[in-house]
Image (tube, grey):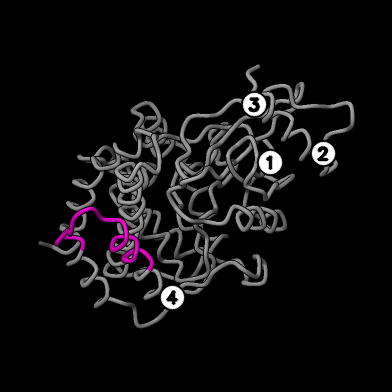
Amino acid sequence: MSAVAAARADAVTGALRGAGVLAGGEAVDAVEQLAGGWSRHTHLARAGARRFVVRAQPPGALLDTDLGLEHRTFAALEATAIPAPRVHAFVATAETPFGGPFLVMEHVPGAAPDMYSRADRAALAADWAGPRAVATDMVDNLARIHALAGDAMPRDLPAYAFDDVLARWRAAYEERALIRDPILEEAYAWVAERAPADAWPGLVHGDFRIGNTLVDGGRVRAVLDWELAYRGDVRFDLGYLAMARAAGKHLRMRSPLMGCFAEQEWFLERYAERTGRRCAPDDLRTFSMLGIMMLLATQLTAVWMYAHRRTTDVRMAWSRWSFAGLRQDMAELMAW
């Protein structure tokens, strides 16, 4: 084990012992960083036969989100019917072997489907053509999320009105874009004119997609990545799922299914049956545009960070290749 890995193992051991999860004679003997993880780095920790997952907030993360709040959100979810990993410990200090604060949670068996993987898309399409268990779990879980009462979540979970969400992602563009982009600026004006007359208040996951779940045995076992959760108009999650990007598009379409797992009309109909709320097509387009704006904010930030030498992660520079497809989707939503 390298010195860094050993230091990380010691840090996780200390956190788990402090939480009473590990006994004095137990210790973490391996920590391995997993693939993926842009604004959070994910690690698998082993203590003998026991497994844990570590989420760490690295310096120079894509989004300025609060890992402590995400920890409290996971803890609040334990009292609900929403499947999510149980959290064991949180270390708030920035001076850790992970380069920042970290939380430790239970390891849930399963894998996060990759919407860019041909094999994973084929498996999801087969589920849709057959039992539709994954599709049903996704709509059921989203309905449960949106139905949560406000007092079920941490008190400091932010609340964003429609205009607040638009302003949040436009500010990221104004601060981090390396050049002006007329399509984005036209899109901001387009969305501002389409603010819904009503609101669907509730808990918004903020990044609800198949890649932020764990699937095992043909069922969704956990909903992950709650760092962007907020109180607001829950149609954001519906519009986000309706984006072509959520179905694996980078420069071209890869799946005809919403989010790679269900036909859009079926999903929206089942959602309406479970919630009593039916999303109008124009509203779905509006919130899909907000979803694209959120994605572009992260991609613009990634390129800005690499250009300004805030990171050496070459994936950040690669993010510029996302712009073309997302700008195309914006133009289509505006019916150009």
Magenta region: 168-184
Tell me the element at label 2. loop
Report the Cα–Cα distance between label 1 and label 3. 12 Å
Most distant residue in the top direction = 1
Most distant residue in the bottom direction = 197
Residue type highlighted by circle 4: Ala
The tag earlier along the polypeptide, 2 or 1, is 2
Residue type highlighted by circle 2: Val
Tell me the element at label 4. loop
Apparent side of residue 334 relative to residue 80 in the rendered image (left or right): left
Residue type highlighted by circle 1: Val
Q: Quadrant of residue 128?
A: top left
The tag earlier along the polypeptide, 3 or 2, is 2
Label annotation for residue 21: 2
Q: How many marks?
A: 4
Tell me the element at label 3. strand
